[in-house]
Amino acid sequence: MKKQETTATQSASDLITQKISSLADWRSVTLARMRELILQEDPEVIEEMKWGDVPVWSHDGIICTGESYKKVVKLTFAKGASLQDPASLFNSSLDGKVRRAIDIHEGVEIDAAAFRALIREAITLNSAGKLAAKSKSVKKAKV
């Protein structure tokens, strides 16, 4: 797993671990589980902390963020509106034109296989966009 250094002494992965531990309730268990599924699906994912204390998982662009609120753990997919969601995991931000989110409430289990499929699809979408951008820049350079 790649780690982006955020300080001289702590990696983003360490900061995410601290953030998860600091929750110390069902949100900690939930966010840790979702992180585990992300890392299982893509061992090369880049973990970052952005916007102060928000865990972010990226691969050729942001896959999703993991926010914790008093009554919900929210996983927001940066390009969620472009992803297929046959298991209907997205249950928040459904009116947005780009993002979609999964709000996980206490006691709710997310279908691991369906979640991993969303992660895989988000990576594929990000990578396709990166390849298309690279192809355009190569074509412009040849002209």
Image (cartoon, grey):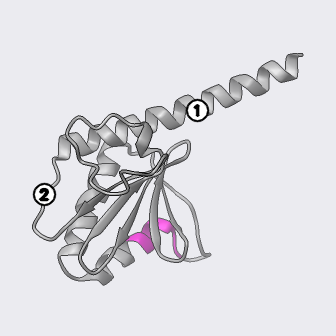
Compared to residue 21, the image places residue 122 above or below, namely above
Q: Residue furthest right?
A: 143
| Residue where numbered disc 1 is placed | 129
The residue drawn where x is 45% and y is 32% is 124
Residue 14 inside the magenta-drawn segment: yes
Residue 58 inside the magenta-drawn segment: no
From mark 2 to mark 1, how far is it between C-alphas?
31 Å
Which amino acid type is shown beneath numbered disc 1? Gly
Determine the image quadrant of residue 119: top left
Viewer-nearest residue: 98 or 72: 98
Compared to residue 30, the image places residue 87 above or below, namely above
| Residue where numbered disc 2 is placed | 109
* Residue 37 placement, left or right of 45: left
Give the total number of marks visible in the rendering. Answer: 2
Q: Which class describes the residues within 10 Å of circle 2: few (<14), some (14-19), or many (20+)?
A: few
Q: Residue furthest front?
A: 95
Indicate the position of residue 84 as horizontal and vertical percent values: 33, 34
Viewer-nearest residue: 36 or 121: 121
The prevailing secondary structure element of the residues shown in magenta is helix
Q: Which class describes the residues within 10 Å of circle 1: few (<14), some (14-19), or many (20+)?
A: some
Determine the image quadrant of residue 28: bottom left
Viewer-nearest residue: 108 or 49: 108
The residue drawn where x is 41% and y is 70% is 16
Quarter of the image for the C terminus: give it.
Answer: top right
* Residue 121 placement, left or right of 128: left
Element assignment for label 2? loop
Q: Which residues are magenta?
A: 10-16
Indicate the position of residue 58 as horizontal and vertical percent values: 49, 50
